[in-house]
Image (tube, rainbow, N blue to C red):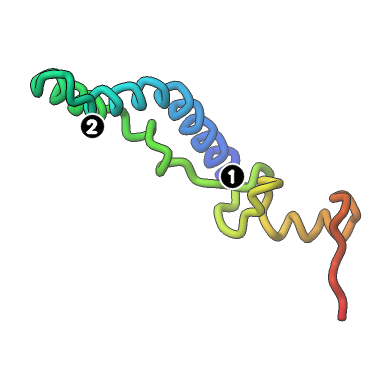
Amino acid sequence: MKIIRKNKKDKERREIYKQAEKMKNMYKMLRRNELLDQETRNYFNMKVTSSEKNSSISRIKNRCVETGRSRGIISAYRISRLRFREYMKMGLISGVKKISY
């Protein structure tokens, strides 16, 4: 049950970031625009800094989509190294096999 909550929270953060990204980038661009007066630039600076904390990309944590594990994630597959190893042994991941010396 705890695993589902972590994945749900991560999914919510990704959605919030996706929605806020365009506006946040526009505000950042406008606050750097030297053609605007200082008061307007300060307003856009305030908009960027006062945005929701979950709208930041640094709040997104890569997690395994099956187990919710946050460490040892194979980013191409979005699963943990443990699940990757299991699937590799079962032959479910094509083009990957265990190396033996």
Q: Earlier in the sequence, mark 2 or mark 1?
A: 1
SS at badge 1:
helix
* Cα gap from disc 2 to disc 1, whole angstroms: 31 Å
**48, 32: nearer the viewer:** 32
Q: Residue furthest bottom?
A: 101
Mark 1, residue position: 3
**5, 52: nearer the viewer:** 52
Q: Which mark is residue 49?
A: 2
**In this picture, residue 71 sits left or right of residue 52:** right
Which image quarter: residue 59? top left
**31, 2: nearer the viewer:** 31
Q: Amino acid at mark 2?
A: Thr
Q: Position of residue 27 (x, y in %)?
A: 29, 23
Q: Amino acid at mark 1?
A: Ile
The residue sitting at 50% across, 26% down in the picture is 15
Q: Does 49 sit above or below residue 79?
A: above
**In this picture, residue 88 sits left or right of residue 18:** right
The residue sitting at 87% across, 62% down in the picture is 97
